[in-house]
Image: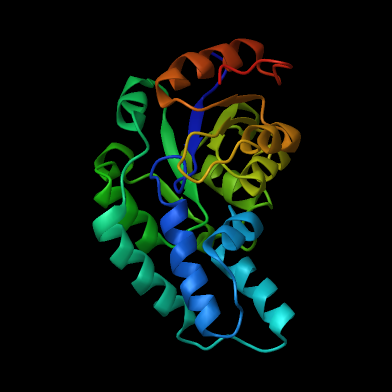
Amino acid sequence: MSFDLVIFDCDGVLVDSEVISCRAHADTLTRHGFPITPDGVLKRFLGVSDREARRIVESEIGRALPDTFEAEVKHATLSFYADDLNAIAHVGDAIAALALPKCVASSGTPEKIHHGLTCAGLYDQLAPHIFSATQVQRGKPAPDLFLFAANQMGANPGRCVVIEDSVAGVTGGRAAGMTVLGFCGGSHCTEEHEDMLRKAGAAITFADMRQLPDLIGRAGQKHRPIAGFSPV
Protein backbone atom coordinates (compact mmCIF):
# COMPACT_ATOMS: atom_id res chain seq x y z
CA MET A 1 0.00 0.00 0.00
CA SER A 2 1.34 3.42 -0.96
CA PHE A 3 -0.14 5.42 1.93
CA ASP A 4 1.44 6.04 5.32
CA LEU A 5 -1.41 7.96 6.97
CA VAL A 6 -5.22 8.24 6.82
CA ILE A 7 -6.58 11.69 7.70
CA PHE A 8 -10.26 11.86 8.59
CA ASP A 9 -12.40 14.95 8.59
CA CYS A 10 -14.79 14.84 11.55
CA ASP A 11 -18.20 16.41 10.85
CA GLY A 12 -20.03 14.50 8.13
CA VAL A 13 -17.32 11.82 7.92
CA LEU A 14 -16.98 10.41 11.44
CA VAL A 15 -20.04 11.92 13.07
CA ASP A 16 -23.33 12.66 11.34
CA SER A 17 -23.35 16.20 12.66
CA GLU A 18 -23.59 18.58 9.72
CA VAL A 19 -27.38 18.95 9.87
CA ILE A 20 -27.18 19.59 13.63
CA SER A 21 -24.35 22.11 13.27
CA CYS A 22 -26.14 23.94 10.47
CA ARG A 23 -29.28 24.23 12.59
CA ALA A 24 -27.28 25.71 15.49
CA HIS A 25 -25.50 28.20 13.23
CA ALA A 26 -28.70 29.19 11.40
CA ASP A 27 -30.57 29.84 14.64
CA THR A 28 -27.76 31.96 16.08
CA LEU A 29 -26.98 33.90 12.88
CA THR A 30 -30.64 34.70 12.30
CA ARG A 31 -30.95 35.98 15.85
CA HIS A 32 -28.03 38.34 15.19
CA GLY A 33 -29.36 39.86 11.98
CA PHE A 34 -28.09 37.43 9.32
CA PRO A 35 -31.25 35.53 8.35
CA ILE A 36 -30.37 32.12 6.97
CA THR A 37 -31.82 28.61 6.99
CA PRO A 38 -29.96 25.44 8.01
CA ASP A 39 -29.90 24.50 4.32
CA GLY A 40 -28.41 27.90 3.49
CA VAL A 41 -25.66 27.37 6.06
CA LEU A 42 -24.96 23.95 4.57
CA LYS A 43 -24.64 25.28 1.03
CA ARG A 44 -22.52 28.30 1.91
CA PHE A 45 -20.30 27.14 4.74
CA LEU A 46 -19.93 23.33 4.60
CA GLY A 47 -16.33 22.51 5.49
CA VAL A 48 -15.38 26.15 6.08
CA SER A 49 -13.80 26.94 9.45
CA ASP A 50 -15.87 28.89 11.98
CA ARG A 51 -13.29 31.68 11.84
CA GLU A 52 -13.58 32.06 8.06
CA ALA A 53 -17.39 31.76 8.10
CA ARG A 54 -17.56 34.54 10.70
CA ARG A 55 -15.32 36.76 8.57
CA ILE A 56 -17.64 36.28 5.58
CA VAL A 57 -20.80 37.02 7.59
CA GLU A 58 -19.33 40.14 9.19
CA SER A 59 -18.22 41.40 5.79
CA GLU A 60 -21.75 40.99 4.42
CA ILE A 61 -23.60 42.58 7.34
CA GLY A 62 -21.06 45.37 7.67
CA ARG A 63 -20.48 44.97 11.40
CA ALA A 64 -18.90 42.63 13.90
CA LEU A 65 -20.86 39.82 15.46
CA PRO A 66 -20.96 39.98 19.27
CA ASP A 67 -18.10 38.56 21.30
CA THR A 68 -20.51 35.94 22.61
CA PHE A 69 -21.34 34.57 19.15
CA GLU A 70 -19.05 31.53 19.20
CA ALA A 71 -20.16 30.65 22.72
CA GLU A 72 -23.82 30.84 21.66
CA VAL A 73 -23.25 28.60 18.64
CA LYS A 74 -21.26 26.15 20.75
CA HIS A 75 -23.95 26.01 23.42
CA ALA A 76 -26.67 25.35 20.81
CA THR A 77 -24.56 22.74 18.99
CA LEU A 78 -23.59 20.82 22.09
CA SER A 79 -27.19 20.81 23.34
CA PHE A 80 -28.36 19.32 20.02
CA TYR A 81 -25.48 16.80 20.11
CA ALA A 82 -26.63 15.36 23.40
CA ASP A 83 -29.97 14.29 21.91
CA ASP A 84 -29.41 13.86 18.18
CA LEU A 85 -25.78 13.01 17.34
CA ASN A 86 -24.83 9.63 15.91
CA ALA A 87 -21.68 8.20 14.39
CA ILE A 88 -21.69 7.73 10.63
CA ALA A 89 -22.95 4.19 10.02
CA HIS A 90 -20.18 1.52 10.14
CA VAL A 91 -17.37 4.07 10.58
CA GLY A 92 -16.15 2.51 13.83
CA ASP A 93 -15.66 -0.85 12.13
CA ALA A 94 -13.95 0.85 9.17
CA ILE A 95 -11.49 2.62 11.48
CA ALA A 96 -10.76 -0.63 13.31
CA ALA A 97 -10.10 -2.42 10.00
CA LEU A 98 -7.42 0.07 8.93
CA ALA A 99 -3.89 -1.01 9.87
CA LEU A 100 -2.45 2.37 8.83
CA PRO A 101 -1.81 5.23 11.27
CA LYS A 102 -4.78 7.58 11.36
CA CYS A 103 -5.73 11.00 12.65
CA VAL A 104 -8.49 13.63 12.55
CA ALA A 105 -8.17 17.07 10.91
CA SER A 106 -11.32 19.10 11.49
CA SER A 107 -12.51 22.67 11.00
CA GLY A 108 -14.22 22.48 14.40
CA THR A 109 -12.85 23.70 17.71
CA PRO A 110 -11.05 21.16 19.92
CA GLU A 111 -13.97 21.13 22.37
CA LYS A 112 -16.53 20.52 19.62
CA ILE A 113 -14.44 17.74 18.07
CA HIS A 114 -13.90 16.06 21.44
CA HIS A 115 -17.56 16.31 22.40
CA GLY A 116 -18.76 15.03 19.01
CA LEU A 117 -16.40 12.05 18.92
CA THR A 118 -17.20 11.22 22.53
CA CYS A 119 -20.97 11.36 21.99
CA ALA A 120 -20.57 9.13 18.93
CA GLY A 121 -18.35 6.64 20.78
CA LEU A 122 -15.34 7.19 18.52
CA TYR A 123 -12.96 9.26 20.63
CA ASP A 124 -10.92 6.38 22.05
CA GLN A 125 -10.32 4.98 18.56
CA LEU A 126 -8.68 8.18 17.33
CA ALA A 127 -7.22 10.01 20.34
CA PRO A 128 -4.78 11.61 20.82
CA HIS A 129 -4.17 12.29 17.13
CA ILE A 130 -6.86 14.95 16.71
CA PHE A 131 -6.09 18.31 15.07
CA SER A 132 -8.21 21.45 14.76
CA ALA A 133 -8.23 24.44 12.41
CA THR A 134 -7.60 26.57 15.50
CA GLN A 135 -4.01 25.26 15.41
CA VAL A 136 -3.18 26.77 12.01
CA GLN A 137 -3.33 30.20 10.43
CA ARG A 138 -5.75 29.28 7.64
CA GLY A 139 -8.55 26.74 7.75
CA LYS A 140 -9.95 24.72 4.85
CA PRO A 141 -9.95 25.17 1.85
CA ALA A 142 -6.32 26.17 2.50
CA PRO A 143 -3.97 23.17 2.88
CA ASP A 144 -2.54 24.31 6.22
CA LEU A 145 -4.47 21.95 8.50
CA PHE A 146 -3.70 18.86 6.41
CA LEU A 147 -0.02 19.76 6.21
CA PHE A 148 0.05 20.39 9.96
CA ALA A 149 -1.55 17.02 10.65
CA ALA A 150 0.89 15.21 8.37
CA ASN A 151 3.83 16.97 10.03
CA GLN A 152 2.59 16.11 13.51
CA MET A 153 2.20 12.48 12.48
CA GLY A 154 5.61 12.35 10.75
CA ALA A 155 4.11 11.56 7.34
CA ASN A 156 5.00 12.78 3.87
CA PRO A 157 1.96 14.71 2.52
CA GLY A 158 2.21 12.87 -0.79
CA ARG A 159 1.71 9.56 1.04
CA CYS A 160 -1.42 10.65 2.91
CA VAL A 161 -5.03 9.84 2.03
CA VAL A 162 -7.77 12.20 3.23
CA ILE A 163 -11.42 11.26 3.84
CA GLU A 164 -13.60 14.35 3.28
CA ASP A 165 -17.24 15.21 2.71
CA SER A 166 -16.97 18.88 1.69
CA VAL A 167 -15.71 20.78 -1.34
CA ALA A 168 -13.59 22.95 0.97
CA GLY A 169 -12.03 19.85 2.51
CA VAL A 170 -11.37 18.14 -0.81
CA THR A 171 -9.84 21.35 -2.16
CA GLY A 172 -7.59 21.69 0.89
CA GLY A 173 -6.47 18.08 0.76
CA ARG A 174 -5.61 18.29 -2.91
CA ALA A 175 -3.76 21.59 -2.34
CA ALA A 176 -1.69 19.75 0.27
CA GLY A 177 -0.67 17.21 -2.38
CA MET A 178 -2.72 14.40 -0.86
CA THR A 179 -5.09 11.84 -2.35
CA VAL A 180 -8.68 12.57 -1.30
CA LEU A 181 -11.62 10.17 -1.08
CA GLY A 182 -14.99 11.94 -1.08
CA PHE A 183 -17.62 10.61 1.31
CA CYS A 184 -21.23 11.34 0.39
CA GLY A 185 -23.15 9.16 2.83
CA GLY A 186 -24.00 11.68 5.56
CA SER A 187 -27.57 12.77 6.20
CA HIS A 188 -26.73 16.23 4.80
CA CYS A 189 -25.66 14.92 1.39
CA THR A 190 -27.89 15.65 -1.60
CA GLU A 191 -27.98 13.97 -5.00
CA GLU A 192 -25.50 16.57 -6.27
CA HIS A 193 -22.97 15.95 -3.51
CA GLU A 194 -20.99 13.21 -5.23
CA ASP A 195 -20.56 15.28 -8.38
CA MET A 196 -19.42 18.32 -6.38
CA LEU A 197 -16.75 16.28 -4.60
CA ARG A 198 -15.51 14.78 -7.87
CA LYS A 199 -15.27 18.20 -9.50
CA ALA A 200 -13.29 19.45 -6.51
CA GLY A 201 -10.73 16.69 -7.06
CA ALA A 202 -11.82 13.62 -5.09
CA ALA A 203 -10.15 10.52 -6.56
CA ILE A 204 -12.99 8.24 -5.44
CA THR A 205 -16.47 8.95 -4.11
CA PHE A 206 -18.39 6.53 -1.89
CA ALA A 207 -21.40 6.47 0.42
CA ASP A 208 -20.86 3.39 2.61
CA MET A 209 -18.06 3.27 5.19
CA ARG A 210 -17.88 -0.51 4.87
CA GLN A 211 -16.16 0.12 1.52
CA LEU A 212 -13.44 2.35 2.97
CA PRO A 213 -10.63 -0.17 3.73
CA ASP A 214 -10.88 -1.67 0.25
CA LEU A 215 -11.07 1.74 -1.44
CA ILE A 216 -7.96 2.97 0.37
CA GLY A 217 -6.18 -0.16 -0.83
CA ARG A 218 -7.27 0.45 -4.43
CA ALA A 219 -6.33 4.12 -4.32
CA GLY A 220 -2.99 3.22 -2.78
CA GLN A 221 -2.17 0.81 -5.60
CA LYS A 222 -2.90 3.52 -8.16
CA HIS A 223 -1.76 6.47 -6.06
CA ARG A 224 -3.48 8.79 -8.51
CA PRO A 225 -7.08 9.87 -9.24
CA ILE A 226 -9.14 6.97 -10.59
CA ALA A 227 -11.17 8.37 -13.47
CA GLY A 228 -14.71 7.17 -13.78
CA PHE A 229 -14.68 4.94 -10.69
CA SER A 230 -17.51 5.30 -8.21
CA PRO A 231 -18.84 2.49 -6.08
CA VAL A 232 -21.89 4.59 -5.03
Residue positioned 70% across, 31% down in the render: 198
Please tell me in which quadrant of the rendered image residue 95 appears.
top left
Q: Quadrant of residue 2?
A: top right
Q: Is residue 48 visible?
A: no
Q: Along the line of sight, which residue is nearer the eye, 184 or 58?
A: 184
On the image, the x and y values in percent for residue 136 come to 58, 60
How far across and down, in percent of the image, does residue 65 sit? 57, 85
User: Coloured how?
Assistant: rainbow
Q: State the image coordinates of residue 109 (x, y, percent, origin top left).
A: 44, 63
- Taking 207 as reference, is 27 above or below it? below
Q: Is residue 81 left or right of residue 64?
A: left
Position above or below: 38 against 95: below
Residue 44 position, x and y percent, is: 66, 59
Asked whether, in this view, residue 201 is left or right of residue 122, the answer is right
Which residue is more in the foreground, 32 or 52? 32
| Rendered residue at 54%/78% (across/down) | 30
Evaluate whether residue 53 shows in this view: yes
Task: Tell which of 177 and 88 is nearer to you.
Answer: 88
Q: Residue at the spot x=67%, y=80% of the render?
A: 58
Q: In the rendered view, does 199 fall on the left or right side of 38?
A: right
